[in-house]
Every structure is written in C-alpha cells, then in structure tokens.
Image: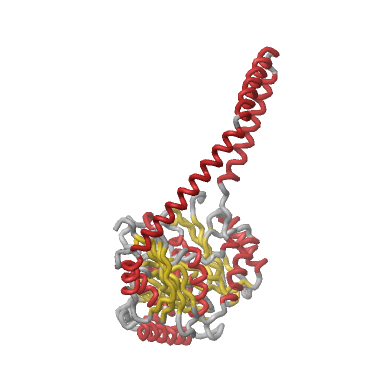
Amino acid sequence: MFSKSTVTLNIETNDIRFLVSRGKRIVDWGSLPLPAGLVKQGLVVEPARVSSAIDTLFSEKKLPKSNVVAGLTGLRSVIRILTLPKLKKSLLEEAIQHEAEREMPVPLAELYLSRQLLGAEGSERRYLVLGVPRDLLDSEIRTLASAGIRPRNVSLKPLALARAANREEALIINLELDAFDLVAVVGGMPAAMRTVMLRGKEMAPEDVIGQVTDELSRTIAFHNSSHPEHPLGPATPVFLTGLLATDTTTSYLVKAAIENPIESLAPALECPPDLPLAQYAVNIGLALARTPARSVASLATARPRVVNPNVLPTKYATQTLSLAHALYPIAAITLVVLALLMYQINSTSEADIAGIQDELNAVNQQLGTVSDVDDPLAASIDKAEAEAEQLNEQRVSILSALATSNLGSNLQLVLGALPRGVRLTSISETEDDISLDGSADDRHSVADYVVALERTGLFSEVYATSVSGAVEDASIAFSVQGTIDTAQ
C-alpha cells in the first residue's frame, strides 16, 4: 500500500506522530505514546528506548523505511538571511561560513549549517542560512539509525509549520505539553521563529497562555521595529496548532487573549475530513517538504514559496547507488555469457581453429609493418608540434599587441564605474579578461561595483571571485574577474 509513499515522523516529548502521504494526498496517520523522560527539551536522552518505539510503530503499521522525512525541534536553532555578491561555487561555502560566523550568536563549532538560495537581484544573491545544534541533530539521527531508518530529509518543525499554514502572511502558535513554537510568516517567508520551553510542567492553562501571549507580543514588536515596511498587525491571521490546540479550554483562552483572527489550516494537500489538522500540522509541513510544486498546483489554494533547507548533514545523507555500481551485476552476467560462448567456440572443429589462427597471423604481420614506420612517423609528429608551438607564440604576441591597443579605453570604463567607497589597488588585462583587485568600505559596495561594471557593456560576464574581511576591519578586500565581450 505504501510502496511509493512518504512517511513523515515527528518525535515529541510525549509521543511519536507519523503521517503517510502519496503525491498530494494524505493516506494514513497516527501516533504512539512515549513514556515520560525519554525526550527532554527536544533532545532524545534515551535513544535505545525511543528507537525501539519507532521500530515497533513501523512494524505495527507496516510503514516503509525507505522514504522518511523527519522533523527536528527549532530549539536553539538560528535563522539568518544573508546577502552576498555573485561568487564562484568554490568560494561560496567559505563566504557563507564567514558571514554566518559574524551573524550567528552561537559558535559555528556547535552548529550544522544548511542553506537555500532565495533569489538573485543583479549581482547579489540572497540565502536563507540555518544553524542547527549538533547535539540535537546527532541524537535524533542516531536514534533513527538504530531503528533502521536513514531519513531522506530532516526539516525544522517551525519551517514545516510555515509550509502547513500555506499563507503569504501568518502567525503560527504551536502548543505542545512542554514547549511552544512561534512562527511569523511575511511574504511567504519565515520572518521570525522561536521555540520556547514552558516555565513549569504543571502550569495552569491560564499561565501557559500568558507566557505564550507575552512571547508573541515581543516577537511582533521586534519584527515590526526591524521591518517597518512589512509590519504584522491585528489583521494578520493566527493559526493555532499542536496537541494543546485540540483542547477546547486552551483554544478559548487564546482567542480571548489576542485580537488577531484565528483561522483553521488549509494546507496544500488533500486531507481526509477526520484528520486532526492542528495535531498533525508539523507532519503535514514535513510532507510538503517532499511534495513537488506541480503536485499541488491543481489545488484550490495557492502555494507560497517553499522554504525547505534540508538540515541533514552530508555525512548522514543517504548514499545513492552510482551508475557504475548499478552496472556491476549486468557486467558480471555479460562476462558469464561471453565465457559460455568462448567455450562453445573452443569446442568447434580443428579446422575452424586453424582458420582463426591464420587470420591472427595476418593481423600480426600488418602490425609489424606499422611498427616499421613508427620511428619516421614519430619524428614527423615532433617536427609538426615544434612548428605549431612556434606559430602559437607568434599568434600570442600579435594578440597581446592588439589587446594593448584597447587598454586605455578599457581602463577608462573600469575606473569610471567605480562607486563611492571602492578603491582599486591593481588592474591586469589579458586577451579576454580583466582582473581587478581592491578594497571597499563594505560588501554592498563590492556588489554595486560589479553591477556598474556589467552596465558598461565591456564584459560578457563579470563577477566577484573573492570577498574577505571581518566586520571590524577598516575595509573589505575583493577581487573581480571580467570576461571582455569580444562581440562588441
């Protein structure tokens, strides 16, 4: 039944929730209770017992372990939007590491970094970068591995909730027994996310809602002060999710405590009418992480941009079977067949064998003739190569002279494009390229310079090959490479 399905897994403090989707349809769901103390503050502290529970769940429900998407708590995770100039792939990783080290309040040695390209404008690229605590992710991956599961994707629960909300603007309150998530979505993007542990295990519902509304007010105020152009107001819809959202008293208290309208989820999946959407909102968002956009294009509700960085580190990623490995069995079978054919040929008459031997002797004679002329031929090749090298040197000399003749006009364009705050320290020009080294007051000035160079029409392609310098430095060092447009 589930051979082509995706299984999503959400490990909470009190239970394990699963949901099965096939294409754009949800076909099954359920949960398995967990004894107290196995999971604390998002960390699996008893991996063996939790692993055993997961294995029991998959066995009882006959769930496939080959296509699993797992959720990870957002506790202590850091999200940042970084803007970088256009860089070569070989330099991108280093640049993101450098910027993340400046922007994130947690040492990178304690985090796994993942990223997703959000968009490009001119020579700038915007990336969503996530820093996930290593201890939380390592513990969950080890637990799943003990149950025989190697997940295809691991996604943060707050981002899964944003996908499940399926709105361009929304506030999401995800209430569980020991913690809650707050997610603000603006323009279809997660503008803010917080995961907060409740102050006490046996808090009264009124106290829980009080803590939630206090954090919600602070989150909204911080966002509005940081992004006054896109404020969150009293008309922004609120989606209440999580186990406590199914409680009538809790839902009533939230409605009484906030002025924003509370709406029901309308995810971009076909959901059975008896599926408790609020309780399985994280699982629904995880299912959308593996659902292609074309699979939900026909649904009535529009799907906003999918923000889905897979936080699964490379060392844990499922190894796909290479083409060479896949061909090994075929090659082995082919060799067996050839061996059988050779055996049959070897069993033919002596006359046939003699005929084959005569043909081999003729071929050997031809090879001997070729070897006799090998030395004169090699000498001719060496002479031709020497002449070709001499001609190439003359060609390079002529082209260098032609390139030098354009140096003055090219320099005028390069220097004329300099924006305020950018200084050049060296310029070198070859037949096809111009290399520029310099310093700038900030990274945005480097991006401005690249854009200005593009507008000169001198280059068919221009990009920054390196940008370095800490925030406390007096300037940013950069290198820019431009390919001269020979068609102009």
Which of the 4 quarters of the picture holds residue 341? Answer: top right
State whether residue 314 appears in this view: yes
The residue at the point 65 percent across, 68 percent down is: 47
Q: Quadrant of residue 270?
A: bottom left
Which of the 4 image quarters holds residue 412? Answer: bottom left
Task: Specify the quadrant that holds the C terminus.
Answer: bottom left
Query: x, y percentage for residue 145?
Result: 63, 61
**Total count of labels:** 0
Q: Looking at this view, is 354 or 228 the one in front? A: 354
In the rendering, at what x and y percent does residue 221 appear? Answer: 38, 86
Task: Return the x and y of residue 283 as percentages of the image width and height.
Answer: 47, 64
Left or right, residue 437 beside residue 43 = left
Q: Residue at x 56, y 74 (%)?
A: 111
Q: Position of residue 169 (x, y in %)?
A: 34, 73
**Residue 356 position (above or below residue 137):** above
Q: Identify which residue, 131 or 358, lies in the foreground.
A: 358
